[in-house]
Structures are given as C-alpha cells and as structure tokens.
Image (cartoon, rainbow, N blue to C red):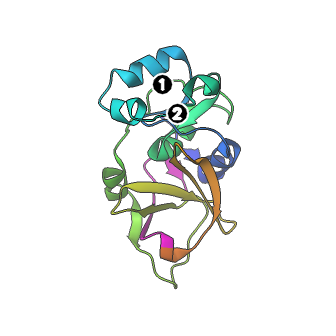
Amino acid sequence: MAKKSVDYLVEYAKAQVGRPYWCGTWGNIASQYLLNRKLNSKVAPMYINNPNPPYTSQFGQKVHDCNGLVYAASECDTPNSAPKAYPNPYWAVPTLYKHCEDAGKLTSETKLVKGELLFRNSLGHVGIYGGDGYVYHAKGHAWGVLKEKYNYKEWTHHGKFKEMYDYS
C-alpha cells in the first residue's frame, strides 16, 4: 500500500470534526448492521450500558474511535468516502505508539510537526496534531471528533507514524 501524505491525514481529520464516536470504527458508515455487529462484539458494554444511546440518529454518518481516526485516512479516498478495506496494520493505541518513529515524551520544548500523533491516558488515547496549534481526535461518545487547542500538559507522548504516512 502506498503511503498517504500527512497533509491528507490532517485534511481527513479536520473534515471529521463534529462526527460521532463509535468504539472500534475507522470511518465506517453508521448503520443498523454496524450497530448489531458492535452489540455482539467485545466492545458491547460501551453500547449496551449507555442509558440514552443516540446511535440510530447517527445512521448514515461516518464514525470513528481515536485510533480509527488515524487509520481511516489510509483507507478512504476522500474525507467523505467510506473505507475501502480494514486498515492494515490496525493496532491498539499502545502498539501504535511503539511503531511511531521520532517518538518520545512531550515537554514544553517539543517542536511538533504537522500530522504527528499525540498520546495520553497512559498511551490509551491518540490524536493528530494539525500543525496549526490544534489537535484533532475522537474523544468519546459524549464528544465525537473534536478540534481542541494543543496544550502539551494534556498530552504525554508524540511520534510520527511513518509506516503509513509520508512526513516529507
């Protein structure tokens, strides 16, 4: 698979702002079929325990989880198209961090580049640095995909996912 540019990764992430968060998704189109798959999967408690699920109102929209937002750009031809395939590789956030290059802990002196991945929550959450002072990330069901001002104190680690995206 040819690498996509970090410019496209950031363009993709920006276009997802305001869209819903669904655990275990990577740009899929929300539908009854997808919801049924989630209800029958290992992530089902997230769906079953929600007392007021908005899922049916989200049918027809693209949905992501945090690492799914990172991977979706590699499988979607445009920010609005559905993914062509299951992303390969598709790692959980800690493993994704282990495969990043030029990775390390964030400090006030860290100089980030556009498309660099940011990590927090003991490497349990990932976002994408937009190069514009903002981070794009799928925060959770209550928030969806957000654009938030970058603050190094809220993120702990960074790295370039060169296996999938071209940073040159």
Residue under the point 33% across and 63% down? 122
Q: Which mark is residue 138?
A: none
Quadrant of the rendered structure where residue 91 is?
top left
Residue 5: give x, y in percent of width and height: 60, 49
- Element type at mark 1: loop
| Quadrant including the C terminus | bottom right
Residue 123: give x, y in percent of width and height: 35, 60
Q: Is residue 87 left or right of residue 98?
A: right
- Density class for disc 2 (Cα within 10 Å; few <14, some 14-19, many ≥20) is few
Q: Nearer the viewer, mark 1 or mark 2?
A: 2
Residue lying farthest to the front in this orientation: 51
Is the Cβ of the residue at disc 1 closer than 8 Å to that at disc 2? no
Tag 2: residue type?
A: Asn
- Density class for disc 1 (Cα within 10 Å; few <14, some 14-19, many ≥20) is few
| Residue at mark 1 | 85
Residue under the point 49% across and 77% down? 153
In the image, which residues are magenta?
154-166
| Residue at mark 2 | 52
Residue 144: give x, y in percent of width and height: 58, 44
Tag 1: residue type?
A: Ala
Residue under the point 44% across and 28% down? 86
Residue closest to the eye, 164 or 44? 44
Asked whether the viewer can see residue 168, the reply is no
Residue under the point 52% across and 42% down? 141
